[in-house]
Image (cartoon, helix red, strand yellow):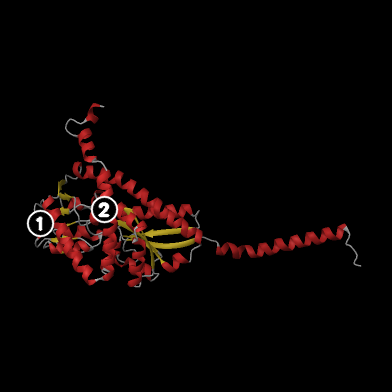
Amino acid sequence: MSKKPDSKTASRRKFLFAAGATAAATVAAPAVNAQQGPINMRWQSTWPSKDIFHEFALDFAKKVNDMTGGDLKIEVLPAGAVVPAFQLLDAVSKGVLDGGHGVLVYHYGKQTALALWGSGPGWGMDANMLLSWHRYGGGKELLNELYASVGANVVSFPYGPMPTQPLGWFKKPITKADDFKGLKYRTVGISIDVFTGLGAAVNALPGGEIVAAMDRGLLEAAEFNNASSDRALGFADVSKICMLQSYHQNAEQFEIMFNKDKFNGLPEKMRSLIANGVDAASADMSWKAVDRYSQDYVELQTKDNVKFYKTPDAILKKQLEVYDEVVKKKAAENPLFKKIVQSQIKFAERAARWENDTVVSRKMAFDHYFGANGAAKKI
């Protein structure tokens, strides 16, 4: 029969065990902390630092950095810091960059169907509705299939619905479709084919290079995106005529892109925070755009002496006709292009019909309050 240890012996053993455990934990702690330290990511946008689009990229990074409590630190560099704007997809896919912020249309040269997330009339949908198709109508799965077809090692999050983009900046107002014949014009994506079909000599340039090209006479006209970007990039220095409304990019959104290996290597909780951060940034971007774009729209007129004109309906109708021809041709050449078009059309017929039937005309309300004898002036 073993002898039971006295209370002093037992207490001493407990003390020594506790001390040993503490020492072991102290030795192990640095290794654990080293593994749990901040994950740093180096990103690049496709925008100059002065463009509001680069600000949107910074906004997303800050949201995710804050949501992770500093466990993830995304640094976003402007276009050209590591690679030229149009080489972002390759750089992220190869791991030269951990991620990036841009638009899918800029990858048009890799696979024409990628432009269906931004170029064109959206089958009557706006950008937010196109994002609805992406999330709930099969677009997400089709985009994954599309990137796999070109061997792109990326995880893509389309987000941030853009308002309808202007037809662009010109030396004089555009009054008819024939005005495009021979015009040296900048655009991107499927719009290249549309404006080529209208007779323009198209040159696809990144945003930061457009104004300089117009100043040197390499371009006679160009479109980019919105009042804030166009003002910051200096369009008003080379043109005083801007044509509003167009179908060439009626339903575009931004893209947040990660290198797939880098993204999949993140903890599951962090991946979830990123996905939710995308949605938060998408909403915030659309709200900020309303505020900032409307301010710069006023200042372009009052401070920069820009004249805005509505694009004639005859030109808008011609855009739709040419777009249809371009889509038929590309669908016949590219099975994935056709598959995506059919998916979008099926969703748009239902969603756009619902919207057109149910959404009341805001223009009538605006005219009532802010017209010549607007009610707002009497309140």
Looking at the image, residue 334 lies above or below residue 300: below
Q: Please, what is the three-letter code of the amino acid marked with disc 1? A: Ala
Q: Secondary structure at mark 2?
A: loop
Percent coordinates x, y for residue 375 in the rendering: 22, 30
**Local crowd at mark 2 within 10 Å, few (<14), some, or many (≥20)?**
many
Q: Which image quarter holds the N terminus?
A: bottom right
At 18% across and 30% down in the image, what residue appears? 373
- Alpha-carbon span between mark 1 and mark 2: 24 Å
- Tell me the residue at 22%/58% (across/down): 120
Task: Residue at 49%, 55% (x, y): give it.
Answer: 68
In front: 238, or 276? Answer: 276
Q: Position of residue 28 (x, y in %)?
A: 64, 65
Q: Estimate how packed mark 1 is, as few (under 14), some (14 to 19) or many (20 or more) residues with alpha carbons within 10 Å.
A: some
Judging by the rendered image, the residue that carries numbered circle 1 is: 177
Q: Which kind of residue does numbered mark 2 sit on? A: Met
In the rendered image, residue 230, in percent from the top left (x then y), is placed at 23, 52
Depth check, front residue: 68 or 371: 371
The residue beneath circle 2 is 125
Give whichever of 221, 195 is nearer the camera. Answer: 195
User: Residue 75 location in percent, x, y?
Assistant: 41, 59
Which of the 4 image quarters holds residue 362? top left
